[in-house]
Image (cartoon, grey):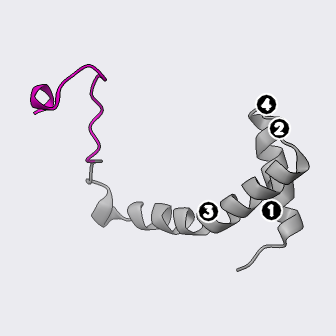
Amino acid sequence: MKKDPATGAAEAAMLAAHAALPLTADRLAAVAAILAAWLPDADALSRKMSAPAYQALMPITVFAHAHESAEDAT
C-alpha cells in the first residue's frame, strides 16, 4: 500500500518533534522519503521475526571496546 507523500511528511514531522529535531522543509522531505522506503520492509521483517520459529534467534553482532584487539575479542 502506497502512502500519500503529505501523510509521510506529517508523520516525519511528528517523529522529529518528539525527538526534538528541528528539520527544515527540505530535510523533512528527505527524511519522509527515507522512512517511506524503509518502513514497509522493516515492518515485514518485524512481523516475520515475531513468529514462534524465529523467537529463539539471537543477534550475531558483537560489541567490543574500541581499544580491544581482534585477537582479544575471540
Residue topped by disc 2? 17
Q: Position of residue 34 (x, y in %)?
A: 67, 60
Contact? badges 4 and 2 (CB < 8 Å) = yes
Disc number for residue 39? 3
Mark 2–mark 3 Cα distance, whole angstroms, equals 19 Å
Q: Amino acid at mark 1?
A: Gly
Going from the N terminus, do you reach mark 1 or mark 4 first? 1
As drawn, the residue found furthest toward the top would be 67
Q: Amino acid at mark 4?
A: Ala
Going from the N terminus, do you reach mark 2 or mark 3 first? 2
Q: Amino acid at mark 3?
A: Leu
Q: Position of residue 68 (x, y in %)?
A: 21, 22
Q: Secondary structure at mark 2?
A: helix
The crowd level at tag 2 (other Cα within 10 Å; few <14, some 14-19, many 20+) is few
The crowd level at tag 4 (other Cα within 10 Å; few <14, some 14-19, many 20+) is few
Residue topped by disc 4? 20
Q: Secondary structure at mark 3?
A: helix
Residue topped by disc 1? 8
Quarter of the image for residue 38 reads bottom right
Contact? badges 1 and 3 (CB < 8 Å) = no
Judge whether 67 appears above or below 59 on screen: above
Q: Secondary structure at mark 1?
A: helix
Judge whether 16 appears above or below 1 on screen: above
> Which portion, as a residue range, is magenta?
60-74
